[in-house]
Image: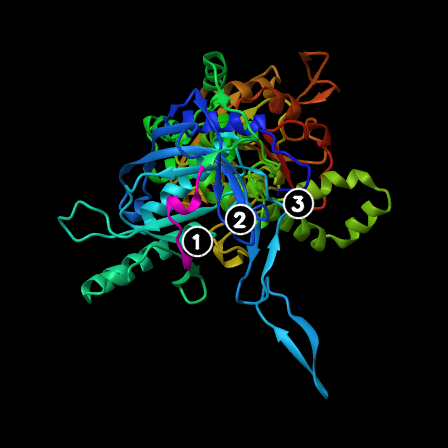
Amino acid sequence: MGLPGALPVVNSKVVEFAVKLGLALNCKLSFYSKFDRKQYFYPDLPKGYQISQFDIPIATGGYLDVDLPVEFGGGHRRFGITRVHMEEDAGKLLHADDGEYSQEITFPIMLHWFSALLTLLYALQVDLNRAGVPLLEIVSEPDMRTGIEAAEYAAELQRLVRYLGVSNGNMQEGSLRCDVNVSIRPVGQSKFGTKVEIKNLNSFSSINRAIDFEIARQALLYSQGKADQIVQETRLWEEGSQKTVTMRKKEGLADYRYFPEPDLPEVILNKEYVDSIQSSLPELPEMKRRRYEEMGLSMQDVLFLANDINVARFFDATIEKGADVKLAANWIMGDIAAYMKNEKLTINEIKLSAAELAELIASIKGATISGKIGKEIVDPSEIEKMVDKVLSENPKQLEQYRGGKTKLQGFFAGQLPPADMEAGTPQSRKVMVIADPTRESAGALQYALSHVLLEEDELVLLHVDTPNSWKNPFITFLRKPSNSQYTTPASLSSSSEGAAAPGGEDFLEEMKQACEVAKPKLRVHVEKVHTESGNKAAIILSQSTAHGVDLLIIGQRRSLSNAILGYRRAGGSLRGSKGVDTAEYLIQNSKCNCVGVQRKGQNAGYLLNTKTYRNFWLLA
């Protein structure tokens, strides 16, 4: 800023960043470079000159590879880099004509015998807070032919500096600024026309529109025979009117009167310093896109994932945990991106970790949960809606819970429907329902038919007959349509009408008929196993394993001991005495998912100690 008694000092970090940027842009580094004074007079430069680099910049002759978006025709372009040089930043002029930065200055003027008030509108303001801050300037070759190419080039530079950690690249903060030079020439002419500079471009879309407007403006002057009206000048882009307007006549190199900066020494690099920076370079956007392409991802996926370094890191961490590449990309680009947009969060701010996403994808792929429940996990608001619904439907229990009856937690958990059992579950599953002549078993099958089973599934009705099995003569499973309270042609019920013969197995046939009526295309198999040992749990476990069952559904009472499975376990050895319940034995040892279906009004908190098992749901 030219403060009295102050001398400039080279910031070592800007030299490091300049070398890093030059290497990333495939430039040739100058192991010897110097600073120069650039003379010009403007309100944002109090001392009347700017420290820059003129004839020996720190990096020259590079290039930047850019993949154009699919919606703009796609394709790969390489744009040349003329130079990268270091300089100091100037101040910031605030002169927007929309009043945002203008200041009304009102002051009195005495004119003989009366006074008047004058108001100066659009007063110029200067912000000098950034003056003297190190700046890296990148000059490109005239290789771009359209506004979209220039905008994508600038966007790629933004990605590059963010990957390198050189800058946050935020255009709205002035961390990344862009001036463009536009010139046109008739077809067949090798010499470029008069160059016009455009400033005040604060977004990539502004770059695109400003260049296209200026090309059209100059082309119109050419067509009208007014090419001499295209002069070397600096123009401003007016966002409101969507046009460029003259700001000032552009100085030539002679006007700047460059000469070596006397207050700063030369910048001398050595090979060890450059090699250390080279080895520290991360995987750059271009390299990352090529790697993602080799994974089989589409260009649309590649451009999205590589656009943000934090998203790319999240994606890489997810697939490192074993997640399917395409599924990981779909989740990040779909539900996670939508959630971040709605909540105005970055991917580093969401609660879902890469390891958890990988586990979620594996659970969906392995049919442990469906895509629907996966979406609810990603977006907690969906789960919150379910919880709010359960609480609103059970005000009495909620009041008791707030009063200190914390055991009701299991009751509330039992009211939540397992959404992963509903639409969207994997096709061609094998479901096993434990079939007994009990109301609970009837409820389990009714739940399976209404919430779980699809037409393409296979159902196994397994009945294990032991000396302890119930022989209930008062249970029927098929209610006639005329008495049905359900929408299905024939439904399961716990009525005493049409009782099965004591000790008989007619209930199995009724169960099968109910399934065939409710879902005609469903493949239903009845499996009957008799054992004198009473080891029912072990038989269920072996049968479910032999059939390769995906889901095991158990009708459940207040206590399962000798009621449904008729067996208990204690001390690690199975025997028909008091101990750990057989249901817990199955939950702990079964490789498939287990669902316990419980009649309403019964104690839904019974199996609270199984809540740590991820393959179990308790439903009331």
For the point 33% across and 37% down, the residue is 66
Q: Which mark is residue 415?
A: 3
For the residues carrying marks 2 and 3, which lies nearer the camera in this image?
2
The answer to which of marks 2 and 1 sits earlier in the sequence is 1
Residue farthest along the bottom direction in this orientation: 113
Q: Quadrant of residue 283?
A: top left
Provide residue 51's location: percent of width, then percent of height.
52, 37
Q: Which residues are magenta?
A: 248-258
Q: Which mark is residue 152?
A: none
Observer-nearest of 161 and 55: 55
For the point 84% across and 42% down, the residue is 405
Q: Is residue 404 left or right of residue 614?
A: right
User: How many neighbours does mark 1 have within 10 angstroms: few (below 14), some (14-19), or many (20 or more)?
Assistant: some
Q: Secondary structure at mark 2?
A: helix
User: How many neighbours does mark 2 have within 10 angstroms: few (below 14), some (14-19), or many (20 or more)?
Assistant: few
Relative to 503, say whether 251 is above or below: below
Q: Which mark is residue 199?
A: 1
Residue farthest along the left direction in this orientation: 188
Q: Is residue 149 left or right of residue 116?
A: left
Q: CA distance from mark 2 to mark 3?
A: 31 Å
> Quarter of the image containing the N terminus?
top right
Q: CA distance from mark 2 to mark 1?
A: 31 Å
Q: Is residue 218 left or right of residue 207?
A: left
The answer to which of marks 2 and 3 sits earlier in the sequence is 2
> Quarter of the image containing the C terminus?
top right
Residue farthest along the right direction in this orientation: 403
For the residues carrying marks 2 and 1, which lies nearer the camera in this image?
1
